[in-house]
């Protein structure tokens, strides 16, 4: 027989007394005190023992019966069910769907403090026009039409910024477009996802570079695609192998023609022309990820694939984040207006709208010339930092590494002259106060790359010297 002393009822507390009774009995069943088949006290017995009204007991028993914890057995009363609905407390599943069971890039301890960082190739937030940006955001918040910022607006993003950006992209990159062909996203990564989600069905074949950008490949895998790796050499992705793949009608090609990730190489002019010819002939979709087009140091960049005739099969992705700071998330997707409409519907499922105040402030900064001046200033500074960093690498680490001075971008691809375990170097660097990649974020078709992508744009001269000194000490002792 149940010991009613195990049940605690507080008439002055919530929930209602009948719920307290039901919850208390369910807890005893969960913990194995009341086993399947155990008879519960009758309504009158329970009411008398707990000094509560019989109707309260009836309500508790009815609630438990509705949840299948107990049932009414003829000539026996209420009995604990043999088939319990939930014997153990519910927890989050420890297993993952098959598509997510691949090892993810190892995350370094986010709470660990580092003195220095070799990032993936990010801008220096310290030179971003933050004061002007905040001033314009405040102005927008308090203007006469500020109420619209508290409402859901066009999921494609600020009309004003889309107007400004469409003009900027037309003038700087030769892309013939209108604002309706532009979708603003919270960074280029979201743009990759919504573009891919609008195209890919489970089982579709997607071509990516080898080595390549791991987070893009992860998007395609998550959507159920079959990944085919195409080698990347000093001239970029192997277009001859793409041509062979055309015979089986793959769904999508993902490419980074300028400053390929992670190796920083640029697709050669000859391969670019052949690839455009293949796109027009076989009509396969291509995501062109052009995340840092602005930063070319030795010559004007070759215009994007999207600037040529492609019959709507090139989806162009760019980033404003690379012009400002990694934490200021704004990317964009350029495509035909029908495709943008479809992509916007997908974006709406995860982000009803972007940061409209931020977008309006950026539009104003493009309109008054602030962004153009900042881009020119950044270009000059990052070229100086590239030259300084590459000189330091050559002088201090030349016996341990080889590299090519990049024509553009914000990172150097360094290869070690002897086989190293990058994860071990990263651990030793962390112990010395330096955060760096352990290589797990590079997508190399299962191979370990004997190289390291080293961002230079966010480091000043003092920081560069400290970073190189730490690496030299580690490599000397390895």
Image: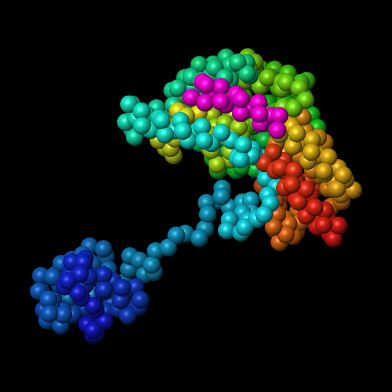
- Helix, strand or loop for the magenta stretch, by majority: helix
Query: Residue at (15%, 67%) from the top-left corner?
Result: 59
Q: Quadrant of residue 278?
A: top right
Q: Is residue 453 above or below residue 145?
A: below
Quarter of the figure with residue 211? top right
- The color scheme shown is rainbow
Residue 63 seen in the current view: yes
- Residue 72 is at least partly visible in this image: no
Left or right placement of residue 428 versus residue 213 in this view: right
Q: Answer with left or right where residue 289 lies relative to residue 346.
A: right
Residue 373 drawn in magenta: yes
Relative vertical location of residue 27 with respect to residue 147 in this rendering, above or below: below
Task: Tell whether 286 sits left or right of 83.
Answer: right
Q: Nearer the viewer, residue 81 or 284?
A: 284
Residue at 84%, 59% (x, y): give it.
Answer: 478
Magenta stretch, residue numbers: 364-381
Vertical placement of 280 versus 141: above or below? Answer: above
Name the one closer to the observer, 42 or 47: 47
Image spot of residue 222 (x, y percent)? 55, 43
Residue at image x 58%, y 20%? 169
Image quadrant where one finds the N terminus? bottom left
Relative vertical location of residue 190 with respect to residue 315 in this rendering, above or below: below
In the depicted view, which residue is nearer to us: 447 or 351?
A: 351
Q: Residue furthest right?
A: 399
Specify whether residue 461 is painted magenta. Answer: no
Q: x%, y% of residue 2?
A: 24, 83
């Amino acid at each position: 027989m149940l010991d009613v002393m195990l049940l605690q009822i507080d008439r002055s507390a919530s929930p209602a007394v009948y719920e307290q009774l039901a919850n208390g009995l369910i807890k005893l069943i969960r913990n194995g005190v009341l086993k399947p088949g155990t008879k519960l006290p009758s309504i009158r017995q329970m009411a008398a023992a707990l000094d509560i009204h019989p109707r309260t007991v009836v309500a508790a028993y009815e609630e438990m019966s509705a949840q299948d914890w107990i049932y009414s057995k003829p000539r026996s009363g209420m009995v604990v069910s043999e088939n319990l609905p939930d014997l153990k407390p519910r927890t989050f599943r420890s297993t993952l769907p098959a598509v997510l069971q691949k090892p993810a890039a190892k995350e370094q301890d986010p709470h660990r403090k580092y003195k220095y960082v070799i990032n993936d190739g990010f801008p220096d937030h310290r030179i971003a026009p933050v004061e002007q940006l905040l001033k314009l955001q405040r102005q927008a918040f308090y203007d006469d039409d500020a109420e619209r910022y508290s409402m859901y607006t066009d999921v494609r993003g600020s009309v004003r910024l889309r107007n400004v950006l469409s003009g900027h992209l037309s003038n700087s990159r030769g892309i013939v477009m209108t604002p309706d062909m532009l979708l603003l996203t919270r960074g280029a990564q979201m743009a990759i996802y919504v573009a891919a989600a609008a195209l890919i069905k489970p089982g579709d074949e997607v071509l990516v570079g080898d080595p390549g950008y791991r987070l893009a490949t992860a998007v395609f895998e998550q959507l159920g695609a079959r990944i085919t790796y195409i080698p990347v050499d000093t001239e970029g992705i192997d277009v001859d192998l793409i041509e062979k793949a055309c015979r089986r009608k793959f769904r999508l090609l993902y490419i980074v023609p300028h400053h390929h990730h992670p190796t920083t190489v640029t697709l050669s002019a000859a391969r670019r022309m052949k690839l455009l010819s293949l796109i027009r002939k076989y009509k396969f979709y291509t995501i062109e990820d052009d995340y840092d087009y602005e930063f070319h140091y030795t010559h004007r960049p070759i215009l994007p694939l999207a600037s040529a005739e492609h019959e709507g099969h090139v989806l162009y992705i760019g980033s404003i984040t690379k012009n400002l700071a990694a934490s200021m998330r704004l990317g964009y997707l350029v495509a035909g207006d029908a495709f943008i409409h479809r992509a916007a519907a997908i974006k709406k499922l995860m982000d009803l709208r972007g940061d409209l105040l931020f977008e309006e402030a950026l539009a104003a900064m493009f309109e008054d010339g602030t962004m153009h001046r900042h881009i020119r200033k950044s270009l000059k500074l990052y070229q100086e930092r590239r030259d300084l960093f590459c000189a330091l690498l050559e002088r201090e680490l030349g016996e341990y590494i080889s590299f090519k001075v990049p024509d553009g971008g914000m990172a150097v691809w360094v290869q070690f002259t002897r086989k190293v375990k990058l994860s071990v170097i990263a651990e030793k660097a962390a112990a010395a106060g330096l955060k760096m990649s352990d290589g797990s974020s590079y997508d190399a078709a299962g191979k370990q790359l004997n190289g390291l992508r080293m961002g230079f744009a966010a480091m000043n001269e003092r920081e560069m010297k400290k970073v190189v000194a730490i690496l030299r000490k580690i490599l000397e002792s390895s």
